[in-house]
Image (tube, helix red, strand yellow):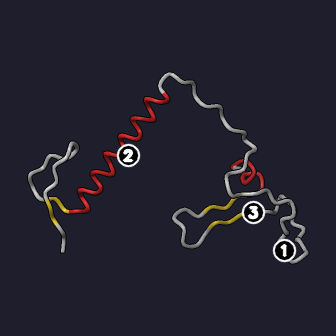
Amino acid sequence: MCQKFVLTCASIHSPLPLPVGLVISHVMKDQYIAAKERWARKMAGKEKPAVRSMTRLPPGQRQVHNLPVLDLGTQPDIPLDKWQLRIHGLVENPVTLNWEQFQSTV
């Protein structure tokens, strides 16, 4: 059951009953727009903020220096001229790349 009521305020002039969710989302949208307008007035005429360091980690993350290598301890010795990456099966466009092609796409 949807509650309905008549709301009249500066941002909504409607004599028709409106669903509660519609009124709340409309009011929230108006508040969001007003906040963006305040920010734009505050920032008008100011130069752009400096770009943060490219080496900076995002909040909540930390650099790990001892990441474990997850393998069985043996790596096969595959000559690069015989190496290939094959993407096939349930894909739209199967692809096979040799080492040179793979390196050029990186």
**Secondary structure state at the residue bearing disc 3:** strand
Label of residue 71 in the image: 1
Residue 31: where, in percent of width, then height? 35, 46
Which residue is at 32% across, 49% downward?
29
Mark 3 crowd level (few <14, some 14–19, many ≥20, 10 Å Cα) = some
Residue of label 2 = 32
- Is 63 or 3 nearer to us in this picture? 3
Left or right of residue 76, residue 37 in this image: left
- Is 70 or 68 nearer to us in this picture? 68
| Tags 2 and 3 touching, CB below 8 Å | no
Residue of label 3 = 84
Q: Amino acid at mark 2?
A: Tyr
Task: Quarter of the image for the N terminus: give it.
Answer: bottom left
- Is 63 or 18 nearer to us in this picture? 18
Which residue is at 71% across, 57% downward?
61
Q: Amino acid at mark 1?
A: Asp
Give me the C-alpha separation between circle 1 and circle 3. Answer: 20 Å
Give me the C-alpha separation between circle 2 and circle 3. Answer: 52 Å
Which residue is at 23% across, 44% downward?
11
Q: Amino acid at mark 3?
A: Gln
Identify the image quadrant of residue 6. Answer: bottom left
